[in-house]
Amino acid sequence: MSEIRKIAENWWGSYQGTDRFIEVVVPHFRQHLGVFKGKDVVDIGSNAGLLTYEISKVSNTCIGVESNIKYHEQALITEEYTKGNCIFLNESVEKFSTRNDISYNALFAANVLYHLKDEGVESVKKILRNCDTVLLFSRENKPKKKNRFDLYHWKNIQKFLEEEGFRTNILFDKDAIIEFSSSHSEINREAE
């Protein structure tokens, strides 16, 4: 964890949940990242890149795609610590889905699909055509009607992937869900 904390200390304007993210969320994700061994991964909505960095430790490569310039600039600080195994692009998922100059065969996204509009979800579908491995994390969230796919709940995400031809597995035991407090009282953190 010290390496991740060292990266985060160099960010400007880090958010209030950084400690929780480093101490709770990253270890939770880390246990599942072995599916990316030997893969070329694209991380949609990579934010400041800490999970991209963790993925890059087991994958061949990892490309973080982040449209928000603030988070992309933080990801560039993270990139300095990755020893060339991952890169970060400041572009939308829509733009990335049209690229043919980058090879990848796996997709990662954490708590991002419910933010996408219909065009963004259609772009994820294009990206999935190149992938044989997908790892998505989501929390049950207050429904956000940004897209017609209702991807604010893991059951809807599971259905979405199955409709795209993927066999799915649920990676959690509801009785073992990590509990933590949040300043966002309107969000149901039950399934995070």
Image (spheres, helix red, strand yellow):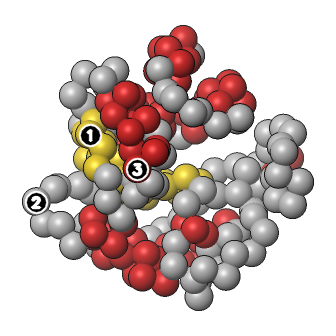
Instruction: Give the numbered dot on residue 87.
Output: 1
Task: Residue 58: give x, y in percent of width and height.
Answer: 35, 31
* Residue 105 located left or right of residue 168: left
* Secondary structure of the residue carrying numbered label 3: helix
- Pick whichever, 22 or 131, lies toward us: 22
In this figure, which residue is indicated by the disc labeled 2?
A: 101
Q: Pointer 1 and pointer 3: residues touching (CB < 8 Å)?
A: no
Q: Amino acid at mark 3?
A: Ile
Q: Which residue sits furthest top?
A: 2
Q: Taking 3 as reference, is 39 above or below it?
A: below
Marks 2 and 1, Cα distance to the nearest angstrom? 14 Å
- Pick whichever, 152 or 183, lies toward us: 183
- Pick whichever, 84 or 76, lies toward us: 76
Q: Taking 151 as reference, is 85 above or below it?
A: above
Using a 10 Å C-alpha cutoff, classify the residue at mark 1 as few (fewer than 14 neighbours), some (14 to 19) or many (20 or more): many
* Secondary structure of the residue carrying numbered label 2: loop
| Residue at the image point whose x is 10% and y is 60% from the top | 101
Using a 10 Å C-alpha cutoff, classify the residue at mark 3 as few (fewer than 14 neighbours), some (14 to 19) or many (20 or more): some
Classify residue 188 by image quadrant: bottom right
